[in-house]
Image (spheres, rainbow, N blue to C red):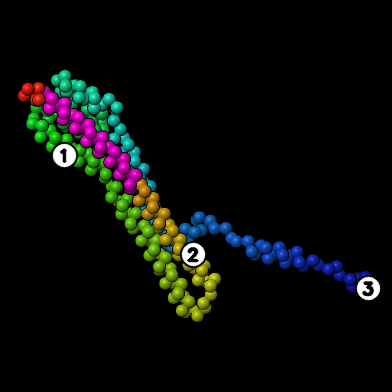
Amino acid sequence: MLLLQVPAVDTTAASLSATSAAAQPQSLQLFDLVAKGGWVMIPIAFLFFATLYLIFERFFVIRSQTKVDGNFVDNVRDMVAQGNIKSAESFARNQRSAMGRVFEKAVGRIGSPIKEIESTIETVGQIELSRLERNMGYLGIIAGIAPMLGFIGTISGIIRIFYDISLSDNISVGIIAGGLYEKMITSGAGLIVGVIAYTGYHLLNMMIERFTLALEVNAFEFIEVLQKPTAERVR
């Protein structure tokens, strides 16, 4: 009889541990999410890296080209007021910045009518602004295209899910939800890229606008210096 007595196995703890293990949600890894997004993630990834390149490239260019010595304009005005035109032109050329090139051309036109000097400043200023804004239009395009690509990936995935359901006649919430969350990844990725491109575009534009305002103020004060001798001769 003792040999027939088998010790009871506590199946309650084993079943609870198995249930808790099954109940634990699987962690989502970033790479797995990207891979489940499908082929649309390839162009979105390309747009993401293009956005980062354009933002950083334009940021460093704009910062270097709009950086001006605080006494630059004052020194140019003083040299012009003293009649040192060649020194002022050389000083502006050595700045190697957008502001320096504008004033270099303006100083080189001294002796011409004021209207011509103003026109020169305006023309050269527009050229320099165009250089600063180079390739920034692509950021605006990416900001509009990336979310649209994400929605296309989501819509195509949803169409595929319901097509598979129509073939199998298996309307399961698990199947629909599992396939749907994978397809929503493209929409999220597209929106993220679009927000980055949109934000970078406007921040860079703000930097250019500050430079434009500084250029207009300095150009106005420079023209006033050129007009003073003329006004004194008239009196």
Give the label on residue 78, or none: none
Disc 1 secondary structure class:
helix
User: 10 Å neighbourhood of mark 1: few (<14), some, or many (≥20)?
Assistant: some
Cα distance between the residues tagged 2 and 3: 60 Å
User: Can residue 46 be seen here?
Assistant: no
Which x, y percent locates residue 57? 34, 42
Question: Nearer the N terminus, badge 2 or badge 1?
Answer: 1
The residue drawn where x is 36% and y is 61% is 148
Count of number-bearing discs: 3
Which x, y percent locates residue 14? 74, 65
Cα distance between the residues tagged 2 and 1: 54 Å
Which x, y percent locates residue 65? 28, 35
Q: Write down the residue under mark 2.
A: 181
Question: Nearer the N terminus, badge 2 or badge 3?
Answer: 3
Which quadrant of the structure image shows residue 93?
Answer: top left
Q: Is residue 30 magenta?
A: no
Disc 2 secondary structure class:
helix
The residue drawn where x is 71% and y is 63% is 17
Give the label on residue 1, or none: 3
- Contact, mark 1 vs mark 3 (Cβ under 8 Å): no
Q: Main secondary structure of the magenta part?
A: helix
